[in-house]
């Protein structure tokens, strides 16, 4: 500041026509005040910059913390997937019952060679394991007594001769080797019949007749003759 004052005094010593004498002290005072204002503005600007930076850091930190908390809350709300247990070695699986399994036998119903002589009706095939009871013009076949010890008429197959065919509903007709086979329902029972000569052989099937398919009935009746 002394150098500035000295220069101003030298400049003031030079006379200039038409201008008032220079006030060096006033100019120096004004310069000092201007310098203080500049320094004050710089300090204020620095403080504001520091405050802005601090605020930005705090805001960013709070935002990150908020996001982390939200993700944790969402994660805890989700239920864990149910655990699936793998089958243990040696663990027995539930047995599946075949569609052709008889409710009266543990074996699949099949036809086998008949080695017994029946009266009135003779068949070269018979249901395996079934017992025949010829009575006059009829033959009653009883299923294997595996699940019941008493004779169940609803489980029997009854063979009989008839001069006229039975009236059937839902009839299915099959013709093979010159024979016409009828399978249908009558009186709540499934009936199979075939004309042999002048008479009809009628087979009344069990109430639970799912084992007796139309093909099995046809094969069984096809092996029979009337005497």
Image: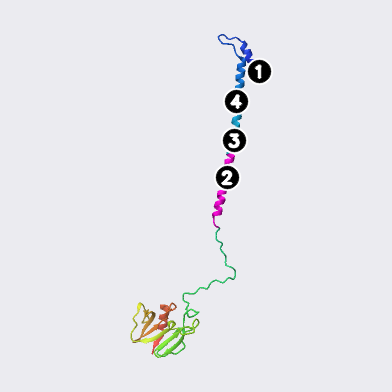
Q: Return the residue at label 1.
A: 3
Q: Nearer the viewer, mark 3 or mark 1?
A: 3
Q: Which disc is residue 38 wearing?
A: 4
Kindly check if marks 2 and 3 are in contact, taking CB atoms under 8 A apart as contact.
no
- What is the number of callouts on the image? 4
Helix, strand or loop at disc 4? helix
Of the two numbered discs 3 and 4 on the same chain, state the one appearing first in sequence: 4
The span shown in magenta is 56-79
- Which residue is pictured at 60% across the width and 28% down the height? 42
Helix, strand or loop at disc 2? helix
Q: Is residue 38 visible?
A: yes
- Spatial CA span between label 3 and label 4: 20 Å
Give the camera-side residue of 159 and 156. 156
- Tag 3: Cα neighbours inside 10 Å, few (<14), some, or many (≥20)? few
Q: Nearer the viewer, mark 2 or mark 3?
A: 3
- Tag 4: Cα neighbours inside 10 Å, few (<14), some, or many (≥20)? few
Please provide percent x and percent y for residue 79.
54, 57
Q: Return the residue at label 3.
A: 51
Image quadrant assignment for residue 2: top right
């Amino acid at each position: 500041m002394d150098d500035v004052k000295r220069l101003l005094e030298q400049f003031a010593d030079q006379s200039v026509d038409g201008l008032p004498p220079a006030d060096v002290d006033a100019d120096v005072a004004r310069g000092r005040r201007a310098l203080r204002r500049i320094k004050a503005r710089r300090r204020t600007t620095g403080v504001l910059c520091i405050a802005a930076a601090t605020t930005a850091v705090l805001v960013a930190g709070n935002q990150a913390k908020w996001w982390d908390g939200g993700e944790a809350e969402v994660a805890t709300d989700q239920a864990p997937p149910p655990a699936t247990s793998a089958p243990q070695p040696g663990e027995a699986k539930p047995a599946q019952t075949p569609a052709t399994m008889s409710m009266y036998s543990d074996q699949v119903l099949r036809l086998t060679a008949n080695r017994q002589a029946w009266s009135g009706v003779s068949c070269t095939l018979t249901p395996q394991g079934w017992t025949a009871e010829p009575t006059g013009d009829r033959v009653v076949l009883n299923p294997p007594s595996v699940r019941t010890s008493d004779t169940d008429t609803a489980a029997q197959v009854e063979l009989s001769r008839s001069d006229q065919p039975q009236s059937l509903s839902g009839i299915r007709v099959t013709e093979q080797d010159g024979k016409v086979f009828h399978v249908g329902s009558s009186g709540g029972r499934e009936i199979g019949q075939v004309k042999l000569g002048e008479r009809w052989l009628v087979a009344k099937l069990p109430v639970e007749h799912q084992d007796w398919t139309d093909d099995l009935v046809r094969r069984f009746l096809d092996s029979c003759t009337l005497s």
